[in-house]
Image (cartoon, rainbow, N blue to C red):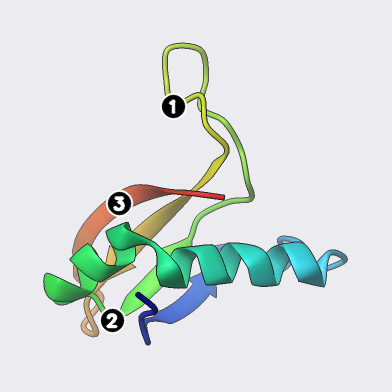
Amino acid sequence: MSSNINITWNDPNTYKTQPQTKQKVETDVRNSPNTSGAVNRGATKAVIMSGIHKSRPGGDPKDHVTVQYKKSNGDHVTTKHVYT
């Protein structure tokens, strides 16, 4: 299910020269069940913290971006991995 959440990047230059990748990541975030859950908890903004990565050994082995979800007043709701 697609969400109307406002999506921004911690570093707006991430994927500056790869607009298709940037758009895919934003679409993945918008359509993620994690986003729907955060919106249900009051989030209005999703901040993508970095590009696609895997966590260090012992962490999440899947390709993902880390997303901070925030309320309109800036309060933190949750931080989640969104798989790409």
Q: Alpha carbon of mark 1 to alpha carbon of mark 2: how far?
A: 26 Å
Answer above or below: position of 31 versus 6: above
User: Measured from the top left, where is residue 35 in percent x and y?
Assistant: 32, 66
How many C-alpha atoms fall within 10 Å of the one at disc 2: few (<14), some, or many (≥20)? many
Q: Residues within 10 Å of mark 3 (few under 14, many from 20)?
A: some
Mark 3 = which residue? 79
Q: Picture quarter containing residue 24? A: bottom right
- Of 74 and 31, nearer the camera is 31
Alpha carbons under labels 1 and 3: distance apart: 14 Å
Which image quadrant: the N terminus?
Answer: bottom left
Q: Which disc number belongs to residue 44?
A: 2
According to the picture, the residue beneath numbered tag 1 turns out to be: 60
Q: Is residue 24 left or right of residue 84?
A: right
Which residue type does callout 1 highlight? Asp
Q: Residue furthest left?
A: 41
Calculate the distance from the C-alpha at mark 3 to the C-alpha at mark 2.
13 Å
Residue 6, percent across and down? 42, 83
Quadrant of the image occupied by residue 41: bottom left
Helix, strand or loop at disc 3?
strand
